[in-house]
Amino acid sequence: MAFTLVQFDFPYSGPWGDDMTAAMGDLARDIAGETGLVWKIWTENQATGRAGGIYVFQTPEAAAAYTEKHSARLAAFGITGINAQSFEVNGVLSDITRAPL
């Protein structure tokens, strides 16, 4: 099966760590229900003031639909400078390096 990876990162002023976990639980549950989502890794870097995530989707279409939806959601939160990129996953090489696909 071919997968599509989406990488989001954007300026973020917090909350961080455990406070982020407490604040974003409902959002995480919402994202978990996205059509075609295989998994997401949440990213945060307080030192650089950036946050985001790495997502894997079952299809390019699901990835594109989510990218559009999440970009709009972030913009509605007042976040600008959003960087969203999509990549095809090389499954054979990823398997060799133990990717959880």
Image (cartoon, grey):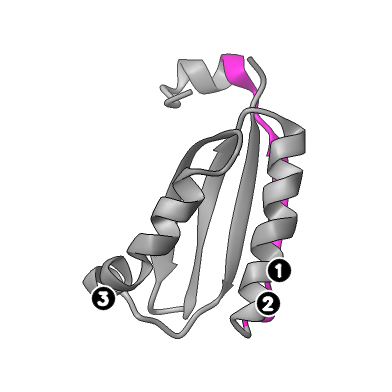
Residue nearest the viewer, comparing 18 with 89: 18
**Which of the marked residues, 3 or 1, is nearer the chain's N terminus?**
3
- Residue 100 rendering spot, x and y as whole percentages: 42, 26
- Check the picture and name the quadrant holding the N terminus: top right
Q: Is residue 89 left or right of residue 28?
A: right
- Read off the residue under disc 2: 75
Would you say residue 97 sits in the magenta stretch?
no
Q: Which residues are magenta?
A: 79-92
At 44% from the left edge and 62% from the top edge, which residue is drawn?
27
- Residue 37 rendering spot, x and y as whole percentages: 55, 37
The amino acid type of the residue labelled 1 equals: Ala
- Residue 17 rendering spot, x and y as whole percentages: 27, 70
View extreme (left): residue: 18
At 76% from the left edge and 45% from the top edge, which residue is drawn?
64
**Which of the marked residues, 3 or 2, is nearer the chain's N terminus?**
3
Asked whether the beta carbons under mark 2 and mark 1 sit within 8 Å of each other, the answer is yes
Residue nearest the viewer, comparing 35 with 5: 35
